[in-house]
Image (cartoon, rainbow, N blue to C red):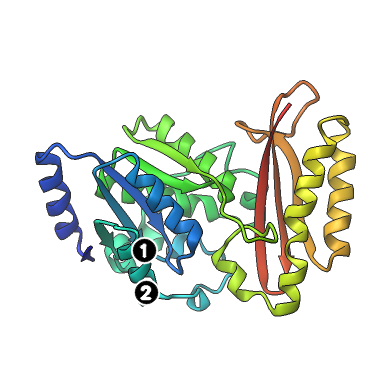
Amino acid sequence: MKIVSEISELRHLISEWRLQGLKIAFVPTMGNLHAGHISLVTEAHRHADKVVASIFVNPMQFGIHEDIDNYPRTMDNDQQQLVAAKTDLLFIPTPKIIYPKGLDKQSYVEVPNVSVGYCGESRPGHFRGVSTVVCKLFNLVQPDVACFGLKDYQQVQVIQTMVEDLSMPIKIIPVATVREDSGLALSSRNGYLTKEERKQAPALAQNIQWLANEIRTNNDFIGLAKKASRAINNAGMNTDYIHICHAKTLQPASEDDTELVILAAAHCGKARLIDNLQVFL
């Protein structure tokens, strides 16, 4: 695996592959990798000749009260996993390389509608930071396809919308969530959980699954979501939100909708966990 940090090095390698007519897939990450990230690399290999991954802890997507300095960084282990997954190129830029003018003078990309509400409401400015850095990374890597995990369902919708609206020639490939045996979605934030909190955390996925079963025969979406929220809280967590939405627009679901997604987030100790489940009626 080739490792580069400078834009000039990255572009040189990408240009060589392009001259050879090779297809390129891209997997952007913030590091602290787990099996969910590696599943993205595995999927990327199915769609391209070369796979590029990036590790960049993006300061633009962290809020005022979110401590970027304490975000876990495990570069050596990350590189070992990417080598084992046969990643061809790893791009590890610094904030100075990505934002040479500083965040206060950086142009940004904002995606309306699908970035509003849910995590967009709980983390103001988060999706602007995500769409901006992904847009910039897309411009640098120039991939044919890019893989994103469906655990961050709203993020996938934001990226897909951005690509469509800006006419980017990139196919976005959503990849299924990887879970622990308990049902808990794999996440870098799971590392914040204590032993006791690990027993509580699966309640998020369990209640989403319960909700999915219920809405097949009961269209009282608001009432059912409130009941699921109470159950999550009773399990020792603190619900941030749980909503039943149209799977594409992310607007509150109506009884006529047939493609739904349940979006949920809850605090478990220091960790803020997110999860979702698509439901087709």
Asked if the residues shown at circle 2 and circle 1 are in contact, with their CB atoms under 8 angstroms apart, the answer is: yes
Mark 2 Cα shell of 10 Å, populated few (<14), some (14-19), many (≥20)? some
Residue 218: x, y in percent?
88, 31
Q: CA distance from mark 2 to mark 1?
A: 9 Å
Asked which quadrant contains residue 60, the reply is bottom left
The residue that appears at 14% across and 41% down in the rendered structure is: 18
Q: Quadrant of the C terminus?
A: top right
| The one of 156 and 195 positioned closer to us in this rendering | 195
Disc number for residue 75 = 2
- Position of 211 with respect to 76 (left or right) is right
| The one of 80 and 228 positioned closer to us in this rendering | 80
Residue at which label 1 appears: 55
The residue that appears at 18% across and 40% down in the rendered structure is: 22
Instruction: Give the residue at the far top of this rendering.
Output: 256
Residue 185: x, y in percent?
62, 57
The residue that appears at 60% across and 31% down in the rendered structure is: 248
The residue that appears at 59% across and 74% down in the rendered structure is: 191
Q: As displayed, is residue 149 above or below residue 93?
A: above
Q: As displayed, is residue 193 above or below residue 143?
A: below
- Position of 258 with respect to 64 (left or right) is right
SS for callout 2: helix
Asked which quadrant contains residue 257, the reply is top right
